[in-house]
Amino acid sequence: MALWGGRFDGDTSDLFKALNDSLPFDCALVMEDIEGSIAWARALGRAKVLKAADVSKLVKALDSIAERESDPATAKISSATDEDVHSFVERELIALVGDLGKKLHTGRSRNDQVATDVRLWTASAIVNLRRLIALAIDALVSLADAELKKRTVLPGYTHLQRGQPVLFAHWCLAYVEMLRRDHERFGDALSRVCVSPLGSGALAGTAYPIDREALAADLGFLEASRNSLDAAGDRDFVFETLSTIALCGVHLSRLGEDLILYSSSEFGFIQMSDRVTSGSSLMPQKKNPDAAELLRGKSGRLIGNLVRIATTLKGLPLAYNKDLQEDKEPLFDSVAHLTLCLRIVPECVSGITINRDRMLAAADDGFSAATDLADYLVRAGVPFRDAHHTAGRLTRTALELRVPLHKLTLDQMRAIEPRIGPDIFKELSIDAVLAKRDVIGGTAIGQVRKQVGIAKASVKAMLRA
C-alpha cells in the first residue's frame, strides 16, 4: 500500500506508476535510508515520542535489514515493487516489528528523508572521489620524479605550436595542480553537503521537539539546516557536486588529449601501455589510445549531467516538487563514471614509455629559444619590443636559410643586430633556456625539484586524511 493512499479512492494507473516510481534507481540509497531511519528513531526517543524499549526494537530491526540488504545474495530490494526506497524500508520494518514500525515516520516527511539520504550518499561519494584523485596525483608525481632524475625535456606548446622547452616533470606537475584544485573543491563542497535537513518535515519543520543538532551529529553532519523551506527543496549540493565532477572531468579530458597527441606517430613522444590501448578490427598495425580517448569522451557525459540538474532546478517554486526526483540519476551516473576515469589514470600514467630522444629533438628544434634571444638583447640594452622584432627577423632569416636559429653564424646575426656577441650560442642552448626559468613555478630543474618535493608531501597528507 502506498504511504500516501488514505486520501485516494481509485487505483493508480500502471503508466503513472512507471512515471512516478523511483525504486529502480533510488534503491541505491537503501543503506543511507536505514542509517537516517536509525538516527530518526533515536531522535524520537530523545524527544520522548517513543519509549526507549521501542527505539531499541526499531534500531535492532533496522540493523537486521541493513545486514541483509548489504549482501547481494540475501538482499530483497532488487526484486521489490515498492514506490521508492522509503516505502521498501518501512514495509520491511513493519514486517519485522508490526505496528511499531508505523510509528517511525512520526514527524518526518519523505521530503526531508530523501534529502538526508542523498546528502549521506553524496558525502560518502565525495570522500571516495578525493581518495581516487589523490591516487591519480600520486601517479603523476611519481612519473615527474622519475623523469626529473633523467632531465627529460618536452617542447611546451601554445596554440599547439612549439613554444618553449620545459621539463617533462613540469608537464606532469601541471596536471597535479589541476587535480589538486579538484581535491580542494570537493573538500569545500563536502562542507555544504554535510548539513542535515532531517527534522525539516515536508516544508515547515517537524511538530515534535527534536534536537536537530544532536540528530545532525548522529548522522555525521556538521550542522542542521537553518530553514525548513530551503532544506526540503535544496539541491544546491547536488549541483555543486556535479559541477566539481564536471570540472575534474574536463581536466582528465585535457590529460587524455595530451596523451593522445603525444602517442601519435606525428609526435611520437610516448607509447601507451598495451593494458590501456586497443587495436583495430581492420588495420593490424594500429594501437589506439582508447583509455585516453574515453577520458576525453566521458567529460561530455559529466558536463551533460550538470546541465540536466541545472535545467531541473531552474524555476522550481519552494519547497519540494517531484521534479527533484530527477536529481539522483545524473548524480549517480557522474560519480560512477568519474570514479572509473580516476581509477584508470594511474594505469595510463605508470605504463607510459617515453621516447626521450624524440622529445629532446622536438624541444631543441632551433627555434624554441627565440624568446631567449630576445631576452639576451634586452640585457644588452635593447628595448623589449625592438628585441622581439629583431628576434623575429633572425628567425625568419634562419627559416629562409633552412637552418636552426643557433646555426646562424655570428656575422649573420650581427648583420641584423650588431650588439650580439659570441656568448649568444651558449645562451641559446637547451640547458641555458631551462636554467633561466628559475622562479617559483618555473621549469628550471631546481624549481621543479622543489615542486616535486612539495607535491610528494601534499599527496601523502591527502592519502592519510
Image: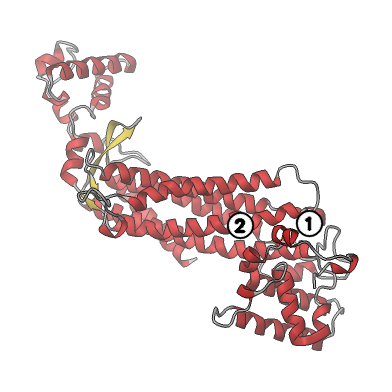
Which residue is pictured at 17% across the width and 15% down the height? 397
Type of residue at label 1? Arg
Type of residue at label 2? Glu
> What residue is pinned by disc 2?
329
Q: Answer with left or right where residue 425 lies relative to residue 260.
A: left
Q: Answer with left or right where residue 97 lies relative to residue 370.
A: right
Residue 435's label in the rendered image is: none
Q: Answer with left or right where residue 7 lies relative to residue 352.
A: right
Q: Quadrant of the N terminus?
A: bottom right
Q: Nearer the viewer, mark 1 or mark 2?
A: 2
In this view, the residue farthest toward the top is 415
Which residue is pictured at 19% across the width and 29% down the height? 427
> What residue is pinned by disc 1?
226
Across and down, in percent, residue 99 comes to 83, 84
Closest to the observer, 216 or 380: 216
Across and down, in percent, residue 327 comes to 66, 54
Q: Answer with left or right where residue 144 lies relative to residue 114.
A: left
Which badge, 1 or 2, comes first in the chain's sequence? 1
Q: Is residue 362 above or below residue 107?
A: above
For residue 254, which quarter of the picture?
top left
| Residue 224 appears in the rendering | no
Which residue is pictured at 26% across the width and 45% down the height? 263
Across and down, in percent, residue 385 comes to 33, 15
Q: Secondary structure at mark 2?
A: helix
